[in-house]
Image: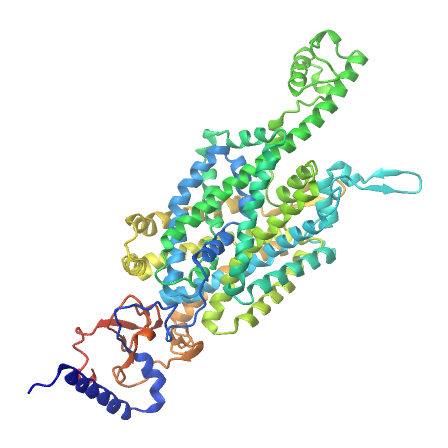
Amino acid sequence: MPKNSKVVKRELDDEVIESVKDLLSNEDSADDAFKKSELIVDVQEEKDTDVEEGSEVEDERPAWNSKLQYILAQVGFSVGLGNVWRFPYLCQKNGGGAYLLPYLILLLVIGIPLFFLELSVGQRIRRGSIGVWNYISPKLGGIGFASCVVCFFVALYYNVIIGWSLFYFSQSFQQPLPWDQCPLVKNASHTFVEPECEKSSATTYYWYREALNISSSISESGGLNWKMTVCLLAAWVVVCLAMIKGIQSSGKIMYFSSLFPYVVLICFLIRALLLNGSIDGIRHMFTPELEIMLEPKVWREAAAQVFFALGLGFGGVIAFSSYNKRDNNCHFDAVLVSFINFFTSILATLVVFAVLGFKANVINEKCIAENLEMVIKLVKMGNISQDIIPHHINFSAVTAEDYHLVYDIIQKVKEEEFPSLQLNSCQIEDELNKAVQGTGLAFIAFTEAMTHFPASPFWSVMFFLMLVNLGLGSMFGTIEGIITPIVDTFKVRKEILTVICCLLAFCIGLIFVQRSGNYFVTMFDDYSATLPLLIVVILENIAVSFVYGIDKFMEDLKDMLGFAPNRYYYYMWKYISPLMLLSLLIASIVNMGLSPPGYNAWIEDKASEEFLSYPTWGMVVCISLMVLAILPVPIVFIIRRCNLIDDSSGNLASVTYKRGRVLKEPINLEGDDASLIHGKISSEMSSPNFGKNIYRKQSGSPTLDTAPNGRYGIGYLMADMPDMPDMPESDL
């Protein structure tokens, strides 16, 4: 009588179990940890279990609480101070509305493809920048270290700007604002206006003298500015507390730091549109100068802005995406964040030019009033005949159009004598054409405009709180670009590393809060990031497209996303983006060579800025910043090429996680690869995407590869169960 099928199945199962027990009994127990990592058979039931939710063997890597939190983190990192004070300046400088077309084209050609690339490799490999590029090619592992160095350099001076914003924020709770009027100086005989302030303006004087107390050159240290030192300390304390638990702490703060700037920008736009002259500023901004758009310089500056606006090369993008689930649609994320960044720049530009238009009208009205007094005085003195003044013009209520009419008549009648009259045309366009960028826009132009706002302290508080939030969002990504790769690679405690990193950065950052500190900020901004970041991103593109292989990468994306990305990205990554990046690198080097290295120093006696060249030691520092930032790339390449460090121990590939513990997996040990079969129940499945899979260690493979479940080891290959002629049936 034939046996019942269930009985037959039970006996077969018992035989397999006994076979495995026999196999285990003949093995050396010292090799258990090694064997458990060498061969894993996944037996998956019908219902897949996500690695982030149900896996007990998959590493305990932190994950975002929600997709919204992740998107806000990426937006907060990419949307920074540059969107508020550099994009509007470039838009004004390079043809107004015509600048938007080159920017949009380059966003599609360079920005989105490269942003998508960084998101993809971070999510696929689930490590920071060091681990990612070490995985792609150990010889190119220096790319990750270079990203960390650049992030550290940028963090040093970027937090100083947050400190400045904190200082102005703390001073904004006063009515009137402290930069509203020039201070008065008293002596024994009389009271007079501070000469330095009278020669410049109240807001300019407050910025250079009260806030920075700036020296006259970079060589004059002048000692620490204690007010800014306290503000810098406060900025680093905020960053440290926000980052100490990684994304578990910073992710929650993103809800405020990423969304609050949009609330402020919209409020500012509504308020500015209600002010006199705001439409003049917006009209000036969007008036296209098409002939300027054809200049190569415009495209170079647009490409650089796209490049830096998205935070490419810093490692923050890779670090944030490494905490995603493996099947997250990072293509959608790349397009969404890129266009949010673009429209944020447009929104900020509208706000800036609406406010500057109002400011220009205020200054223009003052100019007309002063020049009208001169005209009346010249008429009374007989230098100008009353008869040439149109009869309908009433000097007691002169509009801007009336003044311009009088000005044109006097200019025609007194053609030869006109220069000696020293009359000003008082055109709004002249004021709007004064290009203001960077700290000059935020701490001088905007603060001056806000002094004319009703309830100016409220708007000042909101503006500088917005700057603090924009800066913090970018700082979180920058610090994450340092912390995550080091934690992933060297397995140090994140809390301790975060405190050490912030403390070290504050100590080094003291050079930026001495009286000459503003000049060092300019130096670091010009030399520590631009060229090194370009080189890093070029190497990233080459590593994926030519070293790892663009075809293999496209297959990985198809496996990870569940659909094949458009072939557009294939051609961008392989041909167009590398050529565009190389062209941008060459253009940047040429521009740097043609532009004399120097900085704008504030000269107290003249109460104005003056361009000064860096001293010899300053040039050495500039060159050292660029060399130090990119030096890890050749060093790691040489070390790997010459086998100066044994790859078999201590590297990323030999480390895995299990229940929050780090397990070192011995490598190059002798023994049968198939010496152990480790069966797992459905709750222990490490991938939702595969059924019965075997991951085997490829004998003698020195290169890094990945198992399809997203775990990383040395030379793991996947083979389906039926297609393994090299494995004896007895082992199964």
Does residue 627 appear anywhere in the picture?
A: no
Name the image quarter holding residue 670: bottom left
Decide if residue 248 is in sight here: yes
Indicate left or right for 305 with 453 as reference. left
Which quarter of the figure is the C terminus placed in? Answer: bottom left
Observer-nearest residue: 34 or 579? 34
Q: Position of residue 629 (x, y in %)?
A: 51, 60
Task: Residue lying at the far right in this picture: please name it.
Answer: 189
- Expressed as whole percent of the image width and height from the top left, the position of residue 134 reads 40, 67
For this view, does 346 lie left or right of residue 685? right
Above or below residue 541? Residue 730 is below
Where is residue 286? Give x, y as percent.
50, 31
215 shown above or below 9: above
For residue 604, side relative to residue 644 (left or right): right
Specify the farthest residue to the top: 387
Out of 343 and 443, give the one closest to the viewer. 343
- Indicate whether 585 appears above or below 727: above
Residue, x 59% and y 59% (percent of image)?
156
> Residue 578, position in %: x, y?
37, 50
